[in-house]
Amino acid sequence: MTEDVETWEKENGVKFLRKVGLRPGQIVLDFGCGVGHYTVPVALTVGSKGTVYAVDKGQQALNELQQKARANNLKNVKIIKTSGQKTLDFESESIEVVLFYDVLHYLGKCDRKRLYQEAQRVLKQDGLLSVYPKHTLEDGPIQEFRRLSLSDVKQEIEGSNFVFERKHCGAISHDDGLNQGCVLNFRKNEDHNCI
Ligand SMILES: C[S@@+](CC[C@H](N)C(=O)[O-])C[C@H]1O[C@@H](n2cnc3c(N)ncnc32)[C@H](O)[C@@H]1O
């Protein structure tokens, strides 16, 4: 792939996230944002009327993101440093899109479950949970995903009351380059209180 990741963040990354379903004016939570390879295109996609909360436990990565946001005059990026807790410090039903991109493999099964529950809580009705499950069995398995297939990850998210909507594939950011990857979109299951 010839395109560099900085160009991707500002051009094809924006196009990709529009296909994923992000829209101007939305409030987005980018959990485990790192240096912001997705935060930047999210900020450009949601625009000045939207907000992206960029959450990470790594101060160095967040410093880099801060510089990048300043250099690109992205005033809608709100950076939040955590201690790595799996609770999300946001009001219930306050967020339109939650991103778990290339981060779930850091977390054990119980922590992932806690995080899915938190995503359920903070997402508005009909909110979107978009997940890039990198490092599953099919795609360079490591850490907590070393024995999990993509289908296992999809099933565990569905088991936390999300409904799988669709998959979006393309040339997307991974670490400091681009690779072919797929993100999975889920919606909050509106029926879970109607038993
Ligand atoms: C591989 S990077 C992915 C960064 C970004 N999402 C991307 O796709 O380019 C994973 C990031 O998740 C962060 N992370 C892992 N566990 C976390 C936790 N419990 N709370 C907050 N951030 C976490 C790491 O610090 C790291 O910056």
Image: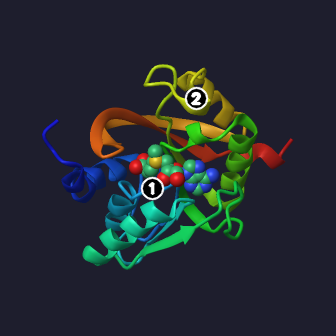
Mark yes or no: residue 142 visible: yes
Would you place residue 194 above or below residue 91 in this image? above
First-in-chain label (1 vs 2): 1
Indicate the quadrant containing the N terminus: top left, top right, bottom left or bottom right.
top left
Q: Which residue is mark 2?
A: 145
Q: Residues within 10 Å of mark 2 (few under 14, many from 20)?
A: many
Residue 83 is left or right of residue 141, and the answer is right
Q: Which residue is mark 1?
A: 34
Q: Amino acid at mark 2?
A: Phe
Question: Which numbered tag is attached to residue 103?
Answer: none
Q: Residue at x 73, y 42 (%)?
A: 113
As measured in the structure, the alpha-carbon distance from the residue carrying label 1 to the one carrying label 2 is 19 Å
Tell me residue 116's x, y (percent): 68, 46
Q: Give the colouring mode of the picture.
A: rainbow
Q: How many discs mark residues in the rendered view?
A: 2
User: Residue 11 or 83: which is nearer the viewer?
Assistant: 83
